[in-house]
Amino acid sequence: MNYDFNNNARIENYHVNQNTQEITFTVTMPLPNSSVSSSSFGTQSDDKGRLAGGGNKPVSEKQLNLLAMLADQQRKNLEVICSSRYRKNSGQLLGREADELIKELRR
């Protein structure tokens, strides 16, 4: 989606979170006497809680470490859980999938 504003700013990309009905987008606009620059609105730091652990971003190292620790504590095999539930290994999880699994293992 590219939408031109009157001041030549454009929405370059966007993501719709189906759970929260929120849109995260990147706007690009020329600065006076310079080349094009980018700004992000609705970034993870602004609404981390609403992105469900990273949304569609890859699983973080911190999430992987926590998952491994929680699975170990419960004497469960993390790779078996990931394979059966998501059909991928732990390193291929999305942030939201890791967040979901962390919450489940904490119960």
Image: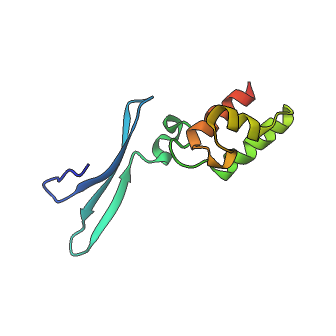
Give the image location of residue 68, x and y in percent: 78, 43
Count the labels in the image: 0
Q: Residue furthest bottom?
A: 33
Give the image location of residue 73, x and y in percent: 85, 35
Which of the two residues, 5 or 70, is positioned nearer the viewer here? 70
Would you identify the image quadrant in which residue 99 lies? top right
Give the image location of residue 79, x and y in percent: 75, 41
Do we see residue 65 in this rendering? yes
Give the image location of residue 31, x and y in percent: 24, 68
The residue drawn where x is 21% and y is 75% is 33
Q: Is residue 52 left or right of residue 4?
A: right
Q: Is residue 5 left or right of residue 77?
A: left
Up the image or down, 10 lies above or below 16; here it is below
Q: Residue furthest top?
A: 107
Would you identify the image quadrant in which residue 69 lies? top right
Q: Is residue 69 left or right of residue 11?
A: right
Q: Residue furthest left?
A: 6
Do we see residue 53 in this rendering? no
The residue drawn where x is 50% and y is 44% is 56
Would you identify the image quadrant in which residue 23 lies? top left
The residue drawn where x is 44% and y is 48% is 43
